[in-house]
């Protein structure tokens, strides 16, 4: 599982304040802590409070690059913000994200190719969030066909079925899990799959339990990557154990410690 740390996000008040005050230490400490906890890449989002994300995103990129060479996942709905982030990036980059809207695909696929970035494609279009598996697969196919037309490697494409909070969209969880499994058979070579895990428990009381249960089910459905909180130790232990049971690591009595020393 490719783990992307979610915590450098302007939706958190400490990060929003650090961005505003250009306080590098808060952001760099978060980066190092998430990596120590097992993150292989870091999601960077200015959040909706940012009044100048085109300046804030490259500042985040430069600040994090001072302390790590890990991949950076440039998280914005605005292509012009993503472009500024990519210009500043020396580390490997992941664009987070394009939707299935042709106008966005036409900008972001060539941008990903130009910067040799991986690309996250979320299965949304101008009609909004899909209500079932079939709509998710339809939008995934649109994203894949645009990538193929542009000669963008589909193996560098991460499809995101859009995880909804279980307390508002309980009847969609099964569809989301099935979409993860079925995205992989839409093309050869397969696209990869990704989710924003914490979405599933937003507004709910037992967040940790819901997150780790959903992650286990998604891993069993073949999930390749997740944006999550790596500082949640129970979540990480659950993930390592799920992958053990799927025979991705070799069992020993101290497999949790052995995995963390890798
Ligand atoms: N897919 C993709 N990218 C994404 C998401 C996705 N990026 C953003 C988001 N979803 C993933 N990141 C988070 C980060 C935090 C939370 C949820 C998803 C979260 N935060 C607390 C909350 O809202 O309750 C904030 C608490 C606080 O303010 O302190 O849950 O799905 N491609």
Image (cartoon, helix red, strand yellow):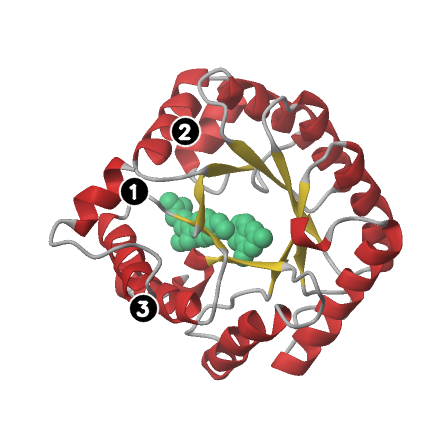
Specify whether residue 113 is in view.
yes
Specify whether residue 9 is in view.
no
| Cα–Cα gap, marks 1 and 2 | 11 Å
Kindly check if marks 1 and 2 are in contact, taking CB atoms under 8 A apart as contact.
no
- Give the residue drawn at x 56%, y 40%: 47
Closer to the chain start, of discs 1 and 2, is 2
Closer to the chain start, of discs 3 and 1, is 3
Dot 3 falls on a residue whose secondary structure is helix
Q: Local crowd at mark 1 within 10 Å, few (<14), some, or many (≥20)? A: some
- Which residue is the site of mark 1? 231
**Residue 221 on image: x %, y %:** 46, 71
| Cα–Cα gap, marks 3 and 2 | 26 Å
Q: Residue furthest left?
A: 253
Q: Local crowd at mark 2 within 10 Å, few (<14), some, or many (≥20)? A: many
**Residue 35 on image: x %, y %:** 37, 33
Whether the residue carrying mark 3 lies under 8 Å from ligand 1 is answered with no
Kindly check if marks 3 and 2 are in contact, taking CB atoms under 8 A apart as contact.
no
- Give the residue drawn at x 31%, y 68%: 213
| Cα–Cα gap, marks 3 and 1 | 17 Å
- Which residue is the site of mark 3? 213
- Asked if residue 139 lies left or right of residue 17, the reply is right
In the foreground, 22 or 44 = 44
- Asked if residue 71 lies left or right of residue 153, the reply is left
Q: Is residue 97 above or below residue 190?
A: above
């Amino acid at each position: 599982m490719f783990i992307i740390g979610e915590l450098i996000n302007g939706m958190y008040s400490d990060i929003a304040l650090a961005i505003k005050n250009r306080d590098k230490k808060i952001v760099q400490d978060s980066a190092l802590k998430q990596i120590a906890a097992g993150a292989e890449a870091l999601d960077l989002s200015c959040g909706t409070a940012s009044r100048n994300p085109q300046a804030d995103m490259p500042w985040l990129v430069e600040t994090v690059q001072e302390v790590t060479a890990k991949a950076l996942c440039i998280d914005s709905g605005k292509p012009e913000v993503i472009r500024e982030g990519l210009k500043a990036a020396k580390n490997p980059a992941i664009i987070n994200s394009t939707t299935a809207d042709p106008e966005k695909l036409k900008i972001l696929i060539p941008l990903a190719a130009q910067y040799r970035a991986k690309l996250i494609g979320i299965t949304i279009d101008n009609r909004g969030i899909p209500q079932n598996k079939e709509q998710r697969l339809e939008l995934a196919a649109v994203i894949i066909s645009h990538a193929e037309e542009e000669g963008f490697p589909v193996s560098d494409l991460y499809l995101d079925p859009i995880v909804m909070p279980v307390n508002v969209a309980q009847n969609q969880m099964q569809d989301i899990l099935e979409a993860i499994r079925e995205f992989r058979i839409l093309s050869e070579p397969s696209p990869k799959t990704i989710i924003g895990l914490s979405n599933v428990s937003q507004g709910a009381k037992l967040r940790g339990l819901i997150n780790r249960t959903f992650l286990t089910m998604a891993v069993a459905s073949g999930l390749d990557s997740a944006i999550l909180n790596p500082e949640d130790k129970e979540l990480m232990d659950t993930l390592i154990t799920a992958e053990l049971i799927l025979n991705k690591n070799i069992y020993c009595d101290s497999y949790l410690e052995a995995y963390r020393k890798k």
